[in-house]
Image: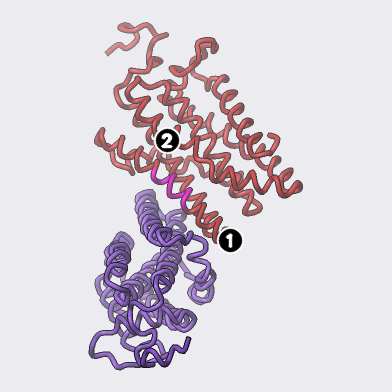
Chain colours: A purple, B red
Amino acid sequence: MSEHRSTPPSAASTTASDGGPQALLELLGLASYTELATFGLLASRSVDAPDLATRQTLAEAADQALGRQLRLLELASGHGVGAVDLMTPFDGSLTDFDARTQPGSWWEGLLKGAVGHGVAADLCTTLARGLPDGDAAAVLAVVEDATRADTTLRLLTDAAARDDVLASRLALWGRRVVGEALTLVQALLTRHPRLADLARSAAPGDAPAAAGDVPSWLLAALTAEHTRRMDRIGLAA
Amino acid sequence: MSEHRSTPPSAASTTASDGGPQALLELLGLASYTELATFGLLASRSVDAPDLATRQTLAEAADQALGRQLRLLELASGHGVGAVDLMTPFDGSLTDFDARTQPGSWWEGLLKGAVGHGVAADLCTTLARGLPDGDAAAVLAVVEDATRADTTLRLLTDAAARDDVLASRLALWGRRVVGEALTLVQALLTRHPRLADLARSAAPGDAPAAAGDVPSWLLAALTAEHTRRMDRIGLAA
């Protein structure tokens, strides 16, 4: 059972197919837990929405988040792992993030959901690319759907276009939320080394090799996607 | 345009097929608005659920409520009426009920959802029976589904069986919530005479004819269904 004799150390646990379905299951756990969180955030903003049309729109957006989560849970259930076992390793992992990003208004709550969910979806998309091809395709079919869900972004875009003061407040708030989200990503990858391995497997060819740490190209890529999203909303990030 | 000369007053607007799709649309408005409210109540209890398994269960129950609502909205859209126009006549109609039934605990919030949704589903089921056969079948296919949705009831049953003190508190609370719900039913039927017409069309053969008022057999039937539901949970109503 001498691991280091049969494989050169530089290849250990950095290739996509290592460890059987464990990395896949850990990514499914992260993705389904964050979709459940998104469901909760959107549903809560539906409950206290300013008008009936917005209430309906956000209820449907919450529903789509849960629909994606149920598809992810089904993938895990194909490997014999139930919803609760799958998500338990991530239970509570958003508590600090939530405490540091208590929204001061309904719009801030909505933007928090959009930013948080955007970063989570981009992270899961990137990590999925580190999986073996078949697994990667199955996960990407769901999580890439999430990056296209733009109802919330449209509500924010309209509001920012109507109200300059709100727009500049939200731009500031978005910077704060994304900062906390990136801190959370680093904590998650440190606590879940299999996810960090996926990130290394997914690294673009020109990324500097960095064992152990959260790769800086990943944080840069997540930041760039966030900036693009905020630009599309009309909030300079 | 003398209405009372062409039809005897006793038959005016008391038969199911009167008024084209207006009665159907009003019932669809009521049913989809109450399903949206149920979505909100269940989703909120998911967000602050005591553990991950319950959080997931209630998110899925909320999802099913919204699924039923979307099917009701589709029926209305077949008559060219969109979600917001359909529900607007009922917007705000639960405000008084909500203010009078502020839950004192998570369990009271969950029971409020179960009782309120139970009464709403039973009401819509009864009113649907006053529609012409084809319309009745289409609405019943959705709202009877709701009366079978029992995830929330199962959570309450387990809790009541585990904890006598909680059970007797919840039994009291259930009585208060159903009292307010029946008051709300009367207010709704008074404010929406087409729904009251549906109730009269749906009356069982031996029910006393009562023009204008909310029929007493309807309140008795809703109360009886509620009592059965509370008995099943293990909470004497």
Q: Which residue is mark 1?
A: B51
Name the secondary structure under disc 2. Answer: helix
| Location of residue A44 in the rendering, given as x and y in whole percent from the top left corner | 47, 58
Q: Main secondary structure of the magenta part?
A: helix
Of A192 and B152, the residue lying toward us? A192
Whole-number angstrom distance, CA of label 2 to CA of label 1? 33 Å
Which percent across, then down, holds residue B72?
A: 36, 37
- The picture quadrant where one finds residue A25 is bottom left
Residue type, label 2: Leu
Find residue A89 and report its horizontal and vertical position in percent: 52, 71
Of the residues under marks 2 and 1, which one precedes in the sequence?
2
Q: Is residue A47 magenta?
A: no
Residue depicted at 70% across the width and 45% down the height:
B161
Magenta stretch bounds: B60-67
| Foreground of the two, B181 or B158 | B158
Q: Quadrant of the C terminus of chain A?
A: bottom left
- Residue highlighted by disc 2: B30
Percent coordinates x, y for residue A133 in the rendering: 27, 71
